[in-house]
Amino acid sequence: RQTSVEQMLSTYSRPRRLSPLAMAMANNVMAHTSKPRLSFALGQNKNNASITTLSSSRMHFSHSTFPPRGINSTDLYNYHQKNMRCRRFSTSNVSHDPPSSTTDERSHHGRLPKDFLSTLRSLHPDLKISTNHYDLESHGHGESYHPSAPPDAVIYPKNENEIVDILRLCCRQVVDDITTITNKNTEAGDGITTVEVVSVIPYGAGTSLEGHLCFLHSGNGSDIDEIVDIPTSLFNNPGNDISDKFQKVRVKRKGGISIDMSFFQSIGEVASGDLFVKVGAGVTRNSLNAALRHTGMQFMVDPGADCTIGGMVACGASGTAAVKYGTMRENVLALRAVIPPTIVSSDIEISERNRPLVVQFGTNALKSSAGYDLPALLTGSEGTLGIITEVTLRLHPIPSNVVAASCAFDDLHSAAEAVAMIRMMGVPVSRCELLDEASVRAFNHSLYLGHGDSNKATESKSRNQQLSLQLQPMEVKPMLFLEFAGHSETSVMEDLAAAQSICMDYDGRNFAFASDEETRQALWAARHRLYYSAIALRSQDGDDGGATSRSTLVTDACVPLSCFADVVTATANDVKEFGVIGPCFGHAGDGNFHCILPMLENDSVEYKEKVSQVNANLIERAMSVGGTCTGEHGVGYGKKKYLECMYGTGGIAIMGAIKKALDPWNMMNPGKILDLKAISNLPL
């Protein structure tokens, strides 16, 4: 994707227009990335000192206008409903000048504690801190339609010790309170101790889809103060009288920071005979597999985007290969993480009581029954329990023989039933993807975007240039895409024959397969290109570039295989009946499916409500058959309202107890997964 994007972005300086498909891809990347490898696209010079004005009449960032500071999740949802549209963003106004400490403290002390950044710099002079407008905006959203809610600073730690100090400074008792509690001369003059809390969200690659990176509870004044009863034991410096078990505390939200993990790039050696590797949380999936290639091993979880390993663990990611190799939950053997402090202090120096914990969960063994499954506790925690710094991953041998196949069906229900039977018969597929008619139509549409001759398929010049000559329009029918992998050609072909026989039993036709890589890629092109092809369905002529990922709702649900055919068919029918545009597809082998529903700035309120209703119906339908509201995207704040329906009040109470035990001050990614008070009122 990087090669394609670089070439497309370079064409902005040329007089000819980009095709709408290329524009959709370029807008999508520019809308959410701040990676250095794309900095040239913004005209940044090699010294990172300034930016060159570019012609950007068709470059769009959606939601570049910030929502109100300190917005809560309900208000943010309402803000999104009112302002869900793509906005034009002029790159000529972006400055990449390195931030100065004077500018930092003058511009942001209103939200962050006044000495927060200066104290960090005094403790770690080499610590990279940015309050650059572009960095803040890009770290305040993921790759989704949720509006941006940026942090007050982006911090780039290089080791666990720096993270320990950062987290410790994010929860401090106001200094003036310590010696005057008994005299009733506290900050507010009411004798109540004040604790300042800075919200913290870890950041990976920014590809999450459920608002995980939005700062919901950052604070903008007295409206966010909470007065709560807390255990006296949570103070490192309690008042003179500690006989009382609880005392009243005013919790004041003081802004938020994003912890960018991009410097955690370590990749360990793979010992001969071992099936694991230790990697830093900032390593991306593609870079890891590139580094492992010489070993003959590979990390097999493939969510599509080039996510960081830490982000994949935090969101419980999976993807197309989960049907054979499992999700992140099955592929994480161990991890290291920094857990926020539970004891509040005003001291700059670290004591044993207020020091954040650096913990090691799990082992290098391929299985263990020792105690609680702690790696699983942080897998899927979405940054609400701590900051993951290192992960030990399960590896698999790169298969010697791979065969890809595709098969058309007359209706979506028959294709889904064929998938269920393939799994019931124990045919070992390594990937199994189902596309509805709208998905195939999007692929065909993408072949000719920007070209008047509908009989000639051309592609942007990229790494797929030779492959593009083989791409042809497909028959607009539901399609099943399969992949088989194994150690011998004989075993793979036997599996292929078994799957083909089942497909024929369900009236499948035009069954095709290939073993060489180029033909396999061509055979699966409709699936590989689906995301950008779907967004390009809402392309527009003229200055408006159409939909981007920042204006697209990507749904996610997972159901038992016995119900998959009925649920996915009903969802596809919803899309048609509501008159919204977007394909329905799924990782059919494990019952996980999605819709990609792009929207435009000028879409009517009624149309956007229909899109939301399709999503709501999909989730309710999935839960009604014992499924889940999210199979791989996570909860964020976009889906937390569904958790009580799934798990009941008892399940929510248990999750709340875990959150309050590990993060009693609700410092880590507040407002995600669960809605909690700042501190637990339960006895600890």
Image (cartoon, helix red, strand yellow):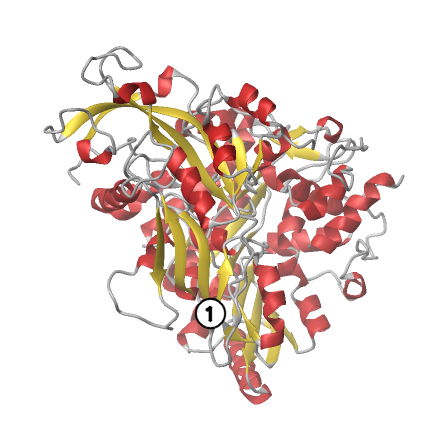
As helix, strand or loop, the secondary structure at mark 1 comes to helix
Q: Position of residue 350 (x, y in %)?
A: 35, 39
Q: Could you tell me which residue is drawn at 49 percent across and 21 percent down?
A: 109
Q: Name above or below for residue 395 compared with residue 545.
A: below
Question: In the image shown, does 374 or 172 lie closer to the viewer?
Answer: 172
| On-image quarter of the C terminus | top left
Q: Name above or below for residue 670 compared with residue 66.
A: below
Residue 50 is drawn in which quadrant? top right
Question: In the image shown, does 314 or 641 lie closer to the viewer?
Answer: 314
Q: Position of residue 63 (x, y in %)?
A: 59, 30
Residue 641 is drawn in which quadrant? top left
Q: Position of residue 96 (x, y in %)?
A: 69, 33
User: Counting other residues with Cα less than 10 Å from the Cα at mark 1, is it few (<14), some (14-19), or many (20 or more)?
Assistant: many
Q: Seen from this angle, which residue lies furthest right?
A: 15
Residue 144 is drawn in which quadrant? top right
| On-image quarter of the N terminus | bottom right
